[in-house]
Image (spheres, rainbow, N blue to C red):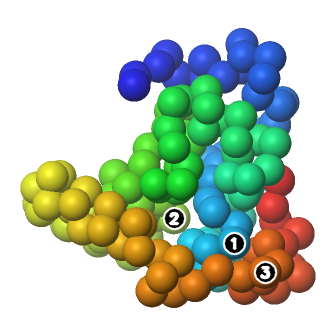
Amino acid sequence: MSLVPYSYRENPAVPDFDDTRPVFIFDHVCVLCSGGVSFIMKHDRRGTIAFTPAQGPLGSALAEHFGIDWNGTYIFVRDGQAFTKCDGYFEVACALGGWWRLGLVFQIIPRPLRDWAYDMIARNRYRWFGKTAEACALLTPEQRARLI
């Protein structure tokens, strides 16, 4: 589904938020997802990326607005547009800048193959990596403070 950039601003179901920086929406009980967010936060020293759980008001409203099932992928909203799966990680690399842009070389792998691998991991993430009883359990208190 392709929407006009920033179309969520006109959607009353989406809470107002500071969208001057990208937002990473993730499953906050998934060990793999929370671990990934922790990793990105550690390397985003400038705080250029905001984070919000998919199960929260903002995350669920944005997922619904974009017509994306957050249970199958995280969502990265940048410049008013939503990106998922491997394409989202390429956008994260661009947002982080510097050496992280070297990860863009993996775009040579055909999208169907990248998405197949991503989908396989997403479907099995709880079985392979587990769930936490506490939301965002893998995040430090400082990292939790960065959530919107």
> Which of 9/11 is in front?
11
Q: Which mark is residue 133?
A: 3
Query: Which badge, 1 or 2, is on the more N-terminal residue?
Result: 1
Which residue is identified by label 1? 29
Q: Amino acid at mark 3?
A: Ala
Crowd class of label 2 (few under 14; some 14 to 19; many from 20; radius 10 Å): many
Check the image and name the residue furthest to the top: 10
Which residue is identified by label 2? 96
Query: Which badge, 3 or 2, is on the more N-terminal residue?
Result: 2
Q: Amino acid at mark 2?
A: Leu
Compared to 110, does 69 lie above or below?
A: above
Horizontal and vertical percent position of residue 99: 38, 75
Cβ–Cβ below 8 Å for labels 1 and 3? yes
Horizontal side of residue 67 vs 143, given as left or right: left
Number of the front mark, 1 or 2: 1
Horizontal and vertical percent position of residue 110: 10, 55
- Identified at 50% across, 38% down, the residue is 68
Cβ–Cβ below 8 Å for labels 3 and 2? no
Cβ–Cβ below 8 Å for labels 1 and 2? no
Compared to 57, does 120 lie above or below?
A: below
> Which of 51/99 is in front?
51
Mark 1 vs mark 3, CA separation in Å = 7 Å
Q: Is residue 141 visible?
A: yes
Q: Secondary structure at mark 2?
A: helix
Q: Secondary structure at mark 1?
A: loop
Crowd class of label 3 (few under 14; some 14 to 19; many from 20; radius 10 Å): few
Mark 1 vs mark 2, CA separation in Å = 24 Å
Q: Secondary structure at mark 3?
A: loop
Compared to 9, does 49 lie above or below?
A: below
- Identified at 81% across, 42% down, the residue is 57
- Identified at 82% across, 79% down, the residue is 134
